[in-house]
Amino acid sequence: MLLSAQATVWNPLKMLRLLKSKSALVALCLGVSLTPFTGYAESDSSLGKVAEQHTRYIATYFPGRMSGTPAEFLTAEYLLQQFSQLGYRTQIRHDPGAERPLSATSVVAEQPGKLAEEILVITHIDTPQSHTAQQRRHNVGGLTFQGIDNNAASLGVMLELAKHLAAHHHEYSLRFVALGGTQPPHQGINTYLQRLSADQRKNTLLVVDIENIVAGKHLAFLSGNTTAAAVRKQTTDRAKTIAQQHAIQLMTAQLASRRSRTLTAYEQAGLPYLRVTASNAGKLTTLAVGEKQSVLHDDAAKDNLAYIQRHYPHRLAQRSHQLVTILTPLLRGLLTPTRAVNTKH
């Protein structure tokens, strides 16, 4: 199966050499400039356009981004180049997979601040793989899976946020992480968290986890079960205020489980947590921590550009604009000591 995957996805590997050596080609394909960013006003109608362009590019050229495949690796190389162009200290990490000889690939981009404390913005690169005959019959994941909702749109938003925040010198550090290996058995998440030292965990003021932001009816910011009330005030409450200023509907709640107060992997590691997502749930407090937010059920016939454009017209552009509009000033505020999250009080 792996050899078949490599054969199917191998053609884009020709693009890898161009991605490394010819940034002008990427700029041409994206239709955006790679010149240093000087900043947009939060009310600028162009907010979200760069995110949408990155989303379309990733979905079109790198489908089937399953853990350990060339498509995942190519996506990581693309992200590496984009972050590097913006001036971030960037690296690729390879995490051995339990089921494949190839390793999951993740990208970490950092902008050091004057202080050791940092804000972590995270999303995932990899797309689901069919493990059973029933999943294959239902078109779950696979080599043709473009994954707009899961999770190219989140990668696009991350890249535009990185562009907006690159020109600002913050007191706190900023770290973007695009993880591979997030599908079961979650080796990418677990390995990343295991690598964090005690000081790094202590200095992580907040994890902002972006996923499944397109298909759900309601844009939602969900605080973790263990996230303190003071942190929620500076995150979900502040996000809702920003959203109201821009006439954006935003639901906020504290993430909870139907059956128990199950914690995310990040909370288990002692990190304050905020999930940015979209959901069809009417009562967000009933959502289980591990419950899928996407209403497209990882269906390759649905989670693609053509289907989303037909059934959710303008949704990709709308969500990209809304999230960049909210998250840019929110993160700028959190990275400023006078208003940043303080988990020690």
Image (spheres, grey):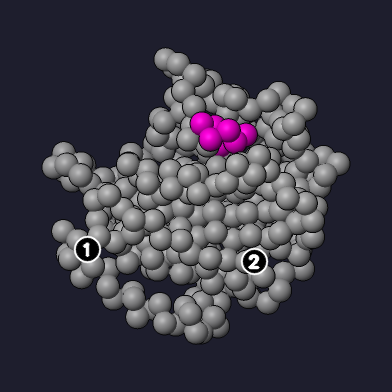
Q: Is residue 308 visible?
A: no
Q: How many marks?
A: 2
In percent of width and height, residue 296 lies at 36, 40
The answer to which image quadrant residue 226 occupies is: top right
In percent of width and height, residue 235 lies at 70, 35
Name the amino acid, label 2.
Tyr
Q: Nearer the viewer, mark 1 or mark 2?
A: 2
Few, some or many C-alpha atoms within 10 Å of disc 1 (few <14, some 14-19, many ≥20)? some
Name the amino acid, label 1.
Ala
Give how far apart the Cα atoms at labels 1 and 2 are: 32 Å
Which disc is residue 115 wearing?
Answer: none
Q: Is residue 241 magenta?
A: no
Q: Secondary structure at mark 1?
A: helix
Q: Residue furthest left?
A: 133
Residue shown at 13%/42% (left/top)?
Answer: 133
Residue in front for this viewpoint, 189 or 50: 189
Residue bearing mark 2: 88
- Decide if residue 148 is on the left or right side of residue 254: left
In this picture, which residue range is highlighted in magenta? 267-275
Residue shown at 47%/78% (left/top)?
Answer: 19
Residue shown at 63%/27% (left/top)?
Answer: 227
Residue bearing mark 1: 5
Q: Secondary structure at mark 2?
A: loop
Q: Quadrant of the N terminus?
A: bottom left
Few, some or many C-alpha atoms within 10 Å of disc 2 (few <14, some 14-19, many ≥20)? many
In percent of width and height, residue 343 lies at 72, 32
Depicted 319 relative to depicted 230: above or below: below
Q: Is residue 272 magenta?
A: yes
- Decide if residue 37 is on the left or right side of residue 291: right
Residue in front for this viewpoint, 132 or 267: 267
